[in-house]
């Protein structure tokens, strides 16, 4: 099944995260927040999270850049942060640090200063 999705986030394992119109979470490799992509859904998914395969990039994120690595090595290709503008990388890292600390501590976090 093909579906058009807007990628909202990046998971900790590097996949783009989107939601179907019904609200189901879809994980899609090779996508970044802000991308609008045509995705082939794997409807045989176990649990509530679906996997999707990028079939066509409809509109690239404004934060997408060319990956700095000239080699097609697995480490670079599987790391989407290399294709994300540096300021967007920092925002993603800060957001995920906050969410991780909140989840682990189960408390309201104090203000965390940002590095500029």
Image: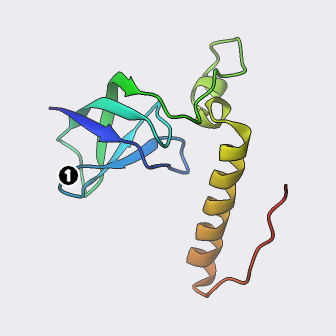
Residue sitting at x 76%, y 73%? 112
**Residue holding disc 1:** 21
Residues packed near mark 1 inside 10 Å, few (<14), some (14 to 19) or many (20 plus): few
Above or below for 112 versus 62: below
Q: How is the image coloured?
A: rainbow
Q: Where residue 50 sits: x, y (%)? A: 27, 46
Q: Is residue 10 above or below residue 113?
A: above
Q: Residue at x 61, y 60 (%)?
A: 96
Count of picture labels: 1
Residue 28 sits in quarter: top left
Q: Split into 4 quadrants, where in the image is the N terminus?
A: top left
The residue most toward the top is 71
What element does badge 1 sit on?
loop
Question: Measuring 18% from the left and 42% from the top, which residue is drawn there?
Answer: 44
User: On the picture, is 113 further left or further right than 61?
Assistant: right
* Nearest to the observer: residue 105 or residue 62: 62
The image shows residue 77 at horizontal and vertical percentages of: 59, 24
- State whether residue 68 is above or below residue 98: above
Residue at left offset 65%, top offset 45%: 88
- Where is residue 81 drawn, in percent x and y? 64, 37
Residue 20 x/y as whole percent: 24, 49
Residue 89 located left or right of residue 40: right
Side of 23 relative to 63 (left or right): left
Extreme residue in the right direction: 116
- Residue placed furthest toward the bottom: 107
Q: Quarter of the image for the C terminus: give it.
A: bottom right
Of residues 109 and 51, the one nearer the viewer is 109
Picture quadrant of residue 106 = bottom right
């Amino acid at each position: 099944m093909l579906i058009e999705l807007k990628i909202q986030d990046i998971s900790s394992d590097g996949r783009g995260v989107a939601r179907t119109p019904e609200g189901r979470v879809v994980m899609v490799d090779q996508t970044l927040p802000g991308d609008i992509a045509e995705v082939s859904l794997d409807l045989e998914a176990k649990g509530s999270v679906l996997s999707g395969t990028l079939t066509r990039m409809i509109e690239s994120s404004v934060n997408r850049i060319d990956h700095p690595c000239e080699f097609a090595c697995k480490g670079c290709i599987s790391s989407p942060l290399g294709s994300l503008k540096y300021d967007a990388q920092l925002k993603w890292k800060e957001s995920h640090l906050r969410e991780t600390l909140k989840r682990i501590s189960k408390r309201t976090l104090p203000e965390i200063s940002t590095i500029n």
